[in-house]
Image (spheres, grey):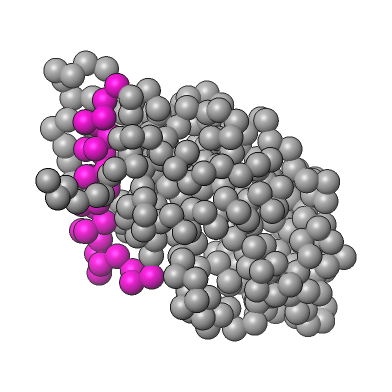
Amino acid sequence: MATTAVTTLKTNLADYPVTKAMKDGRVTSDLVTLDYCGPDQAHNGFKAMLRENGYDCGELAIVTLLQAKIYGKPWVALPVPINGRFQHHCAGFNREFGHLNPKDIEGKRVGVRSYAQTTGLWIRGILQHEYGVDLDKVTWCKVGEGHLLEYRDPANVEALPKGSDIGQMMLDGELAATLQGVDLPKDPRVEYLVPNPFEAAKDWYAREGVVCINHMFVVHEELSRNRPDVVREIFRMIVESRELTEGGVPAIYPPIGLEANRKGIQLAIDWAFEQKIIPHKIAVDDLFDETTASLGLVDKG
């Protein structure tokens, strides 16, 4: 990549309040142009990103990032989550078929878009660690595949027929519950599996101090190795875009910086290993390189 001209990078980044200023042109650079050529829903570009090097940079689900690093894919994280949220409200059931407490899903079939989906990781970890659910006793029914060819689901994952609608299957009683987040059916019969999930999330945050990270921003390792100036510029653009978020960045939102996010990333690693999404643990620092790990640090020299 020539250093004498503006570098254009194919970028997979969806629309979020914190990225709006980047995408609408309020935050620009004389060094790099981000070509937002990814799909409207960024997760639909993850396979092309990982299997075909279809993009130079963009967002990547934290679970997919962990798998990418373990399976030797050439991606490096920037210490800036693109989105994140509490996940306690992301599981539901149809109350017409009887009330369910979290542990009641043991021995039952529960729907999820894909087993390695980040929402699934977080809500399953909450169900296990906060409510004592034995995840191995649940049959997880998926409708989609993981993003990496090397990954294989655990034995207690069942692939549903192509085109299955897990929300409708839950409403019809074919699934005891579903892990769907914002995609939970807007139906008065649907009840949250975690009791009082929004209050439970506040209590969890008070104890853990972590907002669940959904997606991180990543760059191709070749870019980070050859053009650290461009990587630093991308980081600046992301930070400035966050600062220009209409109404401000939510008070409860993943922070900026490696150390500020270390506990949340470590939790994702621990739970991904427990749930057999990754075959072994890796260090938080392995997701970053010398250039990206230092981003966001204040120079005191």
Q: Residue at x 81, y 58 (%)?
A: 136
- Residue 263 lies, with reference to residue 29, above or below; the image says below
Identity of the residue furthest to the right in this view:
107
Q: Which residues are magenta?
A: 226-252
Image label count: 0
Q: Where residue 172 sits in the image (x, y, percent)?
A: 80, 67
In magenta stretch: residue 251: yes
Q: Is residue 234 above or below residue 18?
A: above
- Closer to us: 231 or 263: 263
Q: Is residue 245 left or right of residue 195?
A: left
On the image, the x and y values in percent for residue 93 come to 72, 73
Question: In the image shown, does 58 or 190 lie closer to the viewer?
Answer: 58
Q: Quadrant of residue 169?
A: bottom right
User: Is 136 inside the magenta-drawn segment?
Assistant: no
60 over 264 or under it: above or below: above
Q: Which residue is drawn at the image coordinates 26% and 30% (left, top)?
A: 228
In which quadrant of the rendered image does the N terminus lie? top left
Residue at the location (40% across, 29% down)?
220
Left/right of residue 110 with respect to residue 200 in the rendered view: right
The rendered magenta stretch, by its main secondary structure, is classed as helix
Q: Is residue 12 visible?
A: no
Residue 61 rendering spot, x and y as whole percentages: 51, 47
Residue 131 quadrant: bottom right
Q: Is residue 186 visible?
A: yes
Give the residue at x 32% y 52%: 257
